[in-house]
Image (cartoon, rainbow, N blue to C red):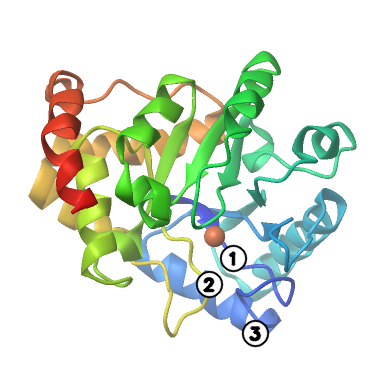
Amino acid sequence: MIDIHTHILPGIDDGAADWNDTLNMARAAVAEGITTLIATPHHANGRYNNAAVEVLEYTHHINEKLIEEGVPITIHSGQEIRWHHDWLESWFRKELLPLANSSYVLLELPSTRIPTEIYELLHELNILKLKVIIAHPERNAEIMKHPERLAELIERGAFAQVTTHSLLGGFGRRIEKMAWFLCKSGLIHIVSSDAHDMERRGFRLREAYEVIGERMGKQWENYFLNNSACVLDDSPFGSKPVEAEASSWGVLHRLGSYFRN
Ligand SMILES: [Fe+2]
């Protein structure tokens, strides 16, 4: 398995606190059957700034340490980049990193809203042939109220990543319901852990895929598994299992109002 959103680099955000934590997380990932991780420390979120050069350096060191310690996993570089006014300029200044040197970037929205400027940014990034993956939309307050707004972002070329802990109830019942609703509406392309530590927010990737297989069918499990591999290969995501295409808009319109009540 491949996990494209993790906070495994030591001491640079609210993820792994030190190298010991980093190695413990890596070992836990291997025990679950994860072969490849993308390290995505927070960047430009108002609390943490981890510019590209620093992340690349840490990623190089972590892979050296993993080889030394005999932990069979590969870590690629990335960032979880908060939307900010300076986004494009930061990209051109080479402060931002795509995921694993691909054309996919992981974008975090503010937790309460969808900035109106995001549509312009999506347009510019489309021109640059960059593909935006929106991190955990199931936890964004505006999307929780208006899930059809995520569909609008996807119509404009964005993709979306759901977090394993959301699907498994780790953030409460409301977020759990929203996570499944978005998945079943065909609005999610990637499943990933957003792992921060081994105590409260570990990986749970295998568990999440198993539940997806049970609730949505094997073809969806395979769809999500394959899309994570597409990020590493820098190839387009696969086609959604057929029934989602037909039902997603209908489901949204039927059930969207439910979440607003
Ligand atoms: Fe994250």
Q: Relative to residue 184, is residue 60 depicted above or below?
A: below
Left or right side of 178 for 97:
right
Whether disc 1's CB lies below 8 Å from ligand 1 is answered yes
Instruction: Examine the image and state in which quarter residue 67 appears.
Output: bottom right
How far apart marks 3 and 1 lie (CA) works out to 14 Å
Judged by depth in the image, the label closer to the viewer, 2 or 3, is 2
Q: Which residue is found at the position 33% from the left and 71% from the top? A: 171
Earlier along the polypeptide chain: callout 2 or callout 3?
3
Q: Position of residue 242 (x, y in %)?
A: 16, 20
Whether disc 2's CB lies below 8 Å from ligand 1 is answered yes
* Amino acid type of the residue that numbered disc 1 sits on in the rendered structure: His
Q: Regarding mark 1 in the picture, which secondary structure is present there?
A: loop
Q: Are marks 1 and 2 in contact (CB under 8 Å)?
A: yes
Please name the residue that numbered disc 2 is placed on: 196
Residue reaching furthest to the front? 261
Please name the residue that numbered disc 1 is placed on: 7
